[in-house]
Image: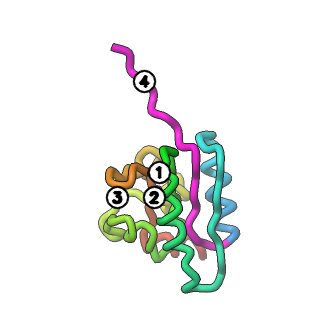
Amino acid sequence: GTVRPRRRARVLVVAQGGYKTICTSLYRLSNYKFMTKIYAIVNQQGGVGKTTSVINMCAYLAASGRRVLLVDIDPQANATSGLGYDKYGLVHSTYDLLLEEATFEEARQSHAEFKLDILPSKPSLSGAEV
């Protein structure tokens, strides 16, 4: 039989992080040329619902049939843990991707329940902000 290539993500959602971090991350990810829409949810103030909004928006977009990639660029990794991943038990994360110590495919996780992909974060990402 013919092997069909995996469909590419159509929506990229970036959760939190500073402006410089987000721009750097999107620049590096743009080399993959797999997304068609980017939604960046950013606010310097804490407790305004950024992570909750991102998780709900991603779940909705995925449920409506769109391919979604959530990129968690927050060292607290609340979007990662909010989707059920252990932020301390990850082998690769956005931190490794930013430092080019892992490829996109190595860092990406597929969430079976929500049918979306995530580039998870972990607390070591705080070292990249220095």
User: Residue 77 in the image: x percent, y percent?
Assistant: 45, 72
User: Residue 105 in the image: x percent, y percent?
Assistant: 44, 44
Name the residue that disc number 3 marks. 91
In depth, the one of 35 and 17 nearer the eye is 35
Name the residue that disc number 4 marks. 4
- Measured in 3D between alpha carbons, the distance from the residue under mark 3 to the one under mark 4, in whole angstroms, is 28 Å
Name the disc covering residue 62, or none: 1
- Measured in 3D between alpha carbons, the distance from the residue under mark 3 to the one under mark 1, in whole angstroms, is 25 Å
Q: What residue type is labelled 2?
A: Ala
Crowd class of label 1 (few under 14; some 14 to 19; many from 20; radius 10 Å): some
- Measured in 3D between alpha carbons, the distance from the residue under mark 2 to the one under mark 3, in whole angstroms, is 24 Å
Instruction: Please state which of the two labelled residues, at mark 2 or mark 3, is closer to the viewer.
Output: 2
Q: Which amino acid does label 4 sit on?
A: Arg
Query: In the rendered view of the protein, which quadrant contains the C terminus?
Result: bottom right
**Label 2 residue SS:** helix
Residue found at x 41% / y 47%: 106
Instruction: Please state which of the two labelled residues, at mark 3 or mark 1, is closer to the viewer.
Output: 1
Name the residue that disc number 2 marks. 59
Q: Do the residues labelled 2 and 3 touch (CB within 8 Å)?
A: no
Crowd class of label 2 (few under 14; some 14 to 19; many from 20; radius 10 Å): some
* Most common secondary structure along the magenta stretch: loop
Among all residues in the image, which is located at the extreme front?
64
Query: In the rendered view of the protein, which quadrant contains the N terminus?
Result: top left
Tell me which segment is drawn in magenta: 1-18
User: Residue 72 in the image: x percent, y percent?
Assistant: 51, 64
Residue found at x 49% / y 60%: 94
